């Protein structure tokens, strides 16, 4: 790999490779996931409480995903001189698809059999759109609106079809900064064009793939440049940075009417991404958290399933005419996500670790048995 990368790149990725190789989960980052999903839960049940909270929560996930997944890709590139696409996409599928299928089984029961929302005729289309990660593509019928939140998964998986190729090119030609700049510039132009084309009804741009993807690039850039960032954000500075980042995210979560704000669409993704990186820089070195934060930590562990289930559960309760739907939606979300974690996600993660361990024994695997990625 030495012939393909610069010494500077090697120095900047050594610490990432070490952390990824030795840890399955970092509790500080699970805590951040807990904060992100809590904002989403509050937004869905009490939208007037946190105007921009849902956006902030989702973009935190995007930034964290860009940071962590790029760390895995970099480890492959350093170790083997290439991304092992088969292993990368296999592990992504094992991590994401079983929990999604579990949700879709529940969706088929509630909307296909019980027809709680009166959308039985769109069930097949909804399932196909969800499984093909095309919920964020405009211009066609996506099926039931109760699965419309899956646009975020579509954004991420489409990004990770393209990003490994871009990353490999940048490292191969030792032009990573230029590649990051070009990718960011292209996304910004696409974002501006999308906002201009939907300015008469800006809320239509909310789930467009151009709007929030810049946060994933910011997270990826932080991973690639972490040695440089470490020189400026260490010790007390990292703590102050995290406080500034946390305060900024809290302020943005309280912005009223964020979903209808052109300014928020133009700068929100990049600003939330940058503030999230400040928080990541402190939390990534916290291997364990104190007992008072354990509930939020637990919520972070089940955050993927909680995100999958919360939006449809919220609407199913409302469509069924349940009076106390808001708090009940949060409770049922946590129950469904906990079941998903223990019955589906944890066994699948164990299988993934088994596959990785078996590959290592054949001297085929690089650095890790489990993923910290969402």
Image (spheres, rainbow, N blue to C red):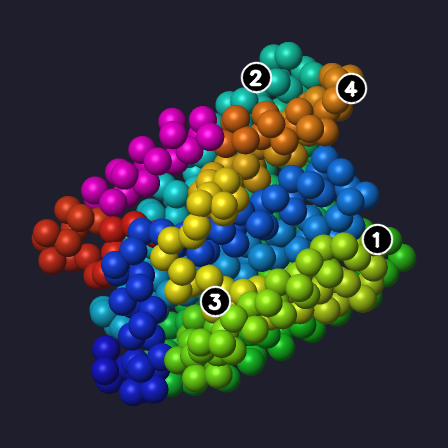
Q: Is residue 28 visible?
A: yes
Task: State the residue position of label 2.
Answer: 109
Q: Residues within 10 Å of mark 4 (few under 14, many from 20)?
A: few
Q: Earlier in the sequence, mark 4 or mark 3?
A: 3
Q: Quadrant of residue 38?
A: top right
- Asked if the residues shown at circle 3 and circle 1 are in contact, with their CB atoms under 8 angstroms apart, the answer is no
Q: CA distance from mark 4 to mark 3?
A: 42 Å
Q: CA distance from mark 4 to mark 2?
A: 22 Å
Is residue 282 shown above or below 332? below
Instruction: Give the residue drawn at x 68%, y 65%.
Output: 248
Q: Which residues are magenta?
A: 338-355
Q: Secondary structure at mark 3?
A: helix
Q: Earlier in the sequence, mark 4 or mark 1?
A: 1
- Asked if the residues shown at circle 4 and circle 2 are in contact, with their CB atoms under 8 angstroms apart, the answer is no
User: Could you say where residue 86 lies in the image, as x and y percent from the top left?
Assistant: 30, 53
- Asked if the residues shown at circle 4 and circle 1 are in contact, with their CB atoms under 8 angstroms apart, the answer is no
Is residue 56 shown above or below 108? below
Task: State the residue position of label 1.
Answer: 257
Q: Residue furthest toward the left?
A: 362
């Amino acid at each position: 790999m030495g012939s393909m990368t610069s010494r500077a790149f090697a120095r900047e990725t050594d610490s990432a490779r070490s952390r990824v190789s030795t840890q399955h989960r970092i509790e500080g980052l699970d805590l951040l996931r807990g904060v992100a999903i809590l904002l989403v839960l509050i937004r869905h049940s009490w939208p007037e409480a946190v105007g921009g909270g849902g956006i902030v929560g989702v973009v935190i996930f995007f930034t964290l995903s860009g940071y962590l997944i790029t760390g895995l890709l970099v480890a492959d590139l350093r170790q083997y001189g290439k991304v092992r696409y088969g292993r990368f996409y296999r592990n992504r599928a094992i991590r994401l698809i079983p929990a999604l299928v579990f949700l879709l089984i529940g969706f088929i029961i509630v909307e296909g059999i019980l027809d709680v929302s009166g959308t039985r005729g769109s069930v097949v289309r909804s399932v196909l759109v969800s499984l093909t990660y095309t919920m964020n593509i405009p211009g066609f019928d996506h099926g039931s609106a109760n699965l419309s939140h899956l646009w975020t998964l579509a954004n991420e998986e489409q990004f990770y079809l393209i990003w490994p190729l871009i990353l490999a090119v940048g490292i191969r030609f030792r032009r990573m900064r230029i590649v990051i700049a070009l990718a960011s510039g292209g996304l910004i132009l696409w974002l501006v064009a999308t906002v201009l084309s939907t300015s008469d009804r800006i809320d239509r741009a909310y789930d467009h793939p151009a709007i929030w993807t810049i946060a994933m690039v910011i997270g990826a850039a932080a991973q690639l440049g972490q040695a440089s960032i470490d020189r400026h954000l260490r010790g007390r500075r990292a703590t102050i940075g995290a406080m500034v980042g946390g305060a900024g995210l809290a302020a943005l979560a309280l912005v009223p009417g964020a979903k209808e704000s052109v300014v928020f669409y133009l700068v929100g993704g990049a600003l939330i991404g940058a503030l999230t990186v400040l928080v990541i820089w402190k939390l990534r070195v916290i291997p364990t958290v104190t007992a008072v934060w354990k509930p939020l930590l637990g919520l972070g562990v089940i955050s993927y399933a909680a995100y999958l289930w919360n939006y449809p559960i919220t609407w199913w309760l409302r469509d069924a005419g349940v009076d106390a739907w808001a708090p009940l939606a949060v409770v049922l979300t946590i129950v469904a996500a906990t079941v998903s974690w223990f019955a589906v996600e944890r066994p699948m993660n164990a299988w993934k670790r088994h596959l990785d361990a078996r590959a290592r024994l054949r001297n085929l695997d690089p650095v890790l048995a489990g993923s910290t990625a969402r």
